[in-house]
Amino acid sequence: MQHILFDMKTDHVGLITLNRPHAANALSIEMLKELQAVIDVIESNPTIRVVVLTGSGEKAFCAGADLKERKAMNEFEVLQTVKLIGETANKLENLSVPVIAAINGVAFGGGLEFSLACDIRIAANHAKVGLTETSLAIIPGAGGTQRLPRLIGVGKAKRLIYTASRLNAKEAYELGIVEEIVANEDLLTTAVDLASKIAENGPIAIKQAKKSINKGLEVDLQTGLEIEHLSYQHTIHTKDRLEGLQAFSEKRKPLYKGE
């Protein structure tokens, strides 16, 4: 693969890198197809418990859609490409394992939409984010109008989208778009350390917790509680649950195997 890099940072933590630094890691069609293929590989690998997503270089996490590529498209091709970006964001969000976005630079348009599809967002202190599409006379088309209001509230999301605002890392943190800000040189280490801490816990439990939270946000409270109960049931018959109890009684660190 040329535009997507993937490697394991630890036994259970994978790193996806958007690798088009010459184009601010913009989302070309080929990159999107490669990313979908990598996501499929991750989903089929039971040893991967957490994923970190970042961009090459220090300037850009992802500047959004590749506008140079789009300039040569007709209207139908533009719609198909936007649909592909949205499908890829959905695929990222629907990964059964947690995904941490390590935002190493600008994340505009589809770049921010990708990070909104992740579970947790950590930003370098020089990062800038925004859903800037209305400045180009279009709207966020890969989940931005849906995920951002759910994350920070309707009024704040409308203000950002309507004004095409570009926020610095501090502003993004204050609004709740990112969960943490760190120095750029510490970004990847911080993200991988957090991923490793998550990976120490029961992998089946983490998957079920993610599923319960994500699916529960889409429904009313009572239905969400029922989803939670069903997710809890999936953990009861696992070997990991018994290992957790045994390790607690023996006052040692549990060794979970995802079984």
Image (tube, rainbow, N blue to C red):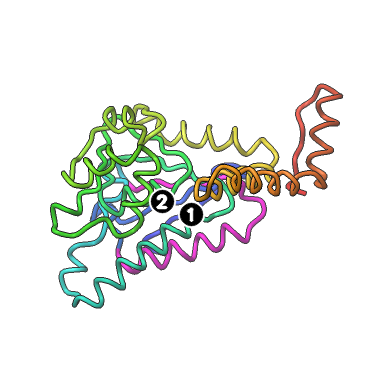
Q: Is residue 78 magenta?
A: no
Vertical comparison of 208 with 34: above or below: above
Q: Tell me if 29 is positioned left or right of 252 in this view.
A: left
* Boundaries of the magenta span: 28-56
Residue 17, numbered circle: 2
Q: Tell whether 258 sits left or right of 22.
A: right
Image marks 2 and 1: residues in contact by CB distance under 8 Å: yes
Which residue is painted at 52% across and 49% down in the image?
219
Disc 1: CA contacts within 10 A as few (<14), some (14-19) or many (>=20) = some
Which quadrant would the N terminus be assigned to in this image?
bottom left
| Residue at disc 1, secondary structure | strand
Q: Secondary structure at mark 2?
A: strand
Task: Report x, y in % for residue 144.
Answer: 32, 51
Give the left or right position of residue 97, taking residue 84 as reference: right
**Residue 206 falls in image quadrant:** top right
Q: Which residue is mark 1?
A: 6
